Amino acid sequence: MRIVLLGAPGSGKGTQSQRLVEAHGVPQISTGDLLREAVARSADAATATPLGLRAKAAMDAGKLVDDDIVLGMIRERLAQPDAQKGFILDGFPRNLAQAAALDALLAELGRPLEAVVLFELDLGILFKRLTGRRICQDCGRVFNIYTSPPGTPPHCERCGDHPRLLQRPDDREDVIGKRLEVFEAQTKPLIEFYRKAGLLRVIDADADVETVFQRLEAALR
Ligand code: AMP
């Protein structure tokens, strides 16, 4: 399985990637997660890197991180042993330059993409999903205060009595608007790009996790 999940922030790509990992045993490669790890390392002055600091500034503003940073990460990640059996790209590529660079890289490796699945979802629903998203700081499990309530007070039952779930800094209302704008302007052109390449499959992502997963599996058959 060598696929790209394409969709606006909040459309469920991360959640569905996790389900695909469990079902197919191929790794999820999320550039958002890789960038957040680099930024977290940079929070400590001793391990801070210029790359982490540059990435943080773009992410906090809801903008895209520079292509050279993201492409370097992807190149390294795809070279790791677990990615040899396949990969689920989540949040990458996000613009046409990244898509072209990915094509070139995969052609070089002799492992072209097999499918690109577009998650379709109404803008109003996306907004609610993003503002409601809360993440367990220990296990990374994702909750939503509207659709999968984490209890009162909010907590992750798997990780015991930790009192608080975190909101990603870029899930604040002011940043979400920018992220959705960036999706419209820079990422949406990929739909046509992959349609022309004959790789595009489209699913309606407005349903519960299990139903969307079934639609995704059907689209990949
Ligand atoms: P995500 O977790 O996919 O929503 O990504 C969070 C943030 O990381 C985005 O708003 C961007 O600032 C940055 N980011 C993630 N993936 C990319 C990418 N492929 N290209 C550029 N920036 C990215």
Image (tube, rainbow, N blue to C red):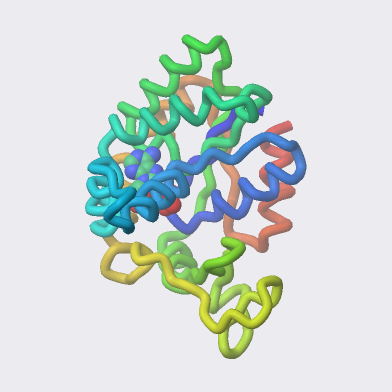
Q: Is residue 15 left or right of residue 74?
A: right
Do we see residue 88 in this rendering? yes
Q: Is residue 102 left or right of residue 120?
A: left
Look at 73% across and 39% down and name the residue there.
218
Do we see residue 64 in this rendering? no
Q: Is residue 99 left or right of residue 26?
A: left
Look at 55% across and 55% down and name the residue there.
12
Look at 55% across and 78% down and name the residue there.
146
Residue 210: x and y, percent? 73, 57
Q: Quadrant of the N terminus?
A: top right
Residue 190: x and y, percent? 39, 33
Q: Quadrant of the C terminus?
A: top right
Residue toward you, 53 or 89: 53
Please tell me whether residue 110 is drawn above or below residue 34 in the rendered image: above
Please tell me whether residue 146 is drawn above or below residue 193 in the rendered image: below
User: Please, which residue is most extreme toward the bottom here?
Assistant: 152
Please tell me whether residue 137 is drawn above or below residue 68 in the rendered image: below
Q: Is residue 121 left or right of residue 185?
A: right
Residue 64's image quarter?
top left
Residue toward you, 218 or 32: 32
Look at 60% across and 54% down and name the residue there.
15
